[in-house]
Amino acid sequence: MALPIGYNVRNLVVRWKVALLAVGGIGLVVMVFVVLLAMASGFRIALGATGAGENGIVVQRGSGSELTSYFSREQGNLIAVDSRIARGSDGQPLASPEIVIVANLPHRVDGQPTNVTIRGVTSRAFEVRRNIAIAEGRRFTPGLNEVVVGRRIRDRIRGLDLGSSITVQRRAWQVVGVFTADGSAFESEVWGDFDVMGPAFLRGGGQNSLTVRLGDPATLKDFDRDLQANPQMQVEMHQERQYYADQAGPVARSLLILAGFVSIVMGIGAVFGAMNTMYAIVAARTREIGTLRALGFSRRSILLAFLIESAFLALVGGVVGCLLAFPMNGFTTATGQTASFSEIAFAFRVTPPDLLRGLLFALAMGVLGGLLPARRASRLPITVALREA
């Protein structure tokens, strides 16, 4: 004979203070767990949103990032005229040669030097990457020492406000625009004219990468195969979005490991807290347990009743923890990117999978914390239970 769920609910209402302690403890652990997952998700989403699926990026073969890639402009020009590259409204190839360096600029809050990616591009970059939009000001003028800055890096670095200027490689660069890029890593960069930055950054004879819009994205593998088969070129092509998503791998994994470690440590404490709570509940209801056994309820029914009660408390705590973590959604922070050695600003993203993991984590804590107390309750002899309390 199974115990009615109403029995568990009534007892939780009567002993609400003890139940509230259990819910609060598990809720705090789940909150921290979900926030750390949201940090990893936000970083992964920011880099995963960088670039477009129909774009290919050409880099030096074997290079770990754009920063360590380099090939000649002549090679880039030969690649750009390939018929598999889409054409713009003017009939010219949608190909963007780019140079990338990292510069130390002062953080807006404490003035500490911060690595920021500086990217030299042509006007084609704004056509190749259609998610780039000027939010304030205007685009830089080709041939001038002007730059446009990503909105997120503008908010974190001194001297990047519209109309101000920064000094990079002993040259002053005036900020004439602020751009957005759907929250991608490009919003953590500063863009200027390719032909001006090339000589200024000692990259006059070459480029770090070439980003192209493909007429048919399905041709990317064949395009890459042809490039690698050419003995005069030491380059390879990747899908742009996948290339930048792969750059997120090491940092995202580190954040997930951190989330796991912190959650395990805190989870152990929460399990013992839940266990103590359930032991206290069992001790307070010893006579009730004896009465239930005398009325014919089996040990298994009592075991399941207390396990369900513990799991219910944990799930309520999980919901509370998820609700506490949700305000962090959209909170902007930054971390270093191992491939480019520069800072990338990104927003925390509390995703449905993160919330589900938080609830499952809470449920696991509840079951583990309630198992031993429930077992003790189910094994109490009827005569002993009726004499106690």
Image (cartoon, rainbow, N blue to C red):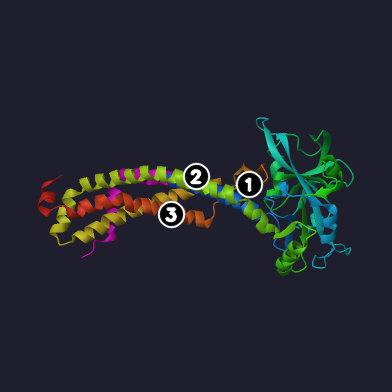
Give neighbour class at mark 2: few <14, some 14-19, many 20+ (Cα, 10 Å): some
Give neighbour class at mark 1: few <14, some 14-19, many 20+ (Cα, 10 Å): many
Residue 346 image label: 1
Task: Tell me which corner region of the image, top left, top right, bottom left or bottom right, holds residue 169.
Answer: top right
Residue 147 in sight in this render = yes
Q: Earlier in the sequence, mark 1 or mark 3?
A: 1
Assign the magenta stretch its main secondary structure. helix
Q: Residue at x 51, y 46 (%)?
A: 36
Helix, strand or loop under label 3: helix
Q: Earlier in the sequence, mark 3 or mark 2?
A: 2
Q: Is residue 389 left or right of residue 18?
A: left
Residue 359 image label: 3
Residue 258 image label: 2
Q: Amino acid at mark 3?
A: Leu
How much space separates mark 1 and mark 3, taking CA atoms? 25 Å
Residue 163 place in picture, x, y as percent: 81, 37
Q: Which residues are magenta?
A: 1-28
Viewer-side residue, 69 vs 107: 69
Residue 289 place in picture, x, y as percent: 18, 53
Q: Amino acid at mark 2?
A: Leu
Residue 326 in sight in this render = no
Q: Is residue 275 left or right of residue 86?
A: left
Q: Amino acid at mark 1?
A: Phe
Residue 316 image label: none
Q: Residue at x 20, y 55 (%)?
A: 378
Q: Earlier in the sequence, mark 2 or mark 1?
A: 2
Q: Residue at x 23, y 64 (%)?
A: 2
Task: Tell me which corner region of the image, top left, top right, bottom left or bottom right, holds residue 155.
Answer: top right
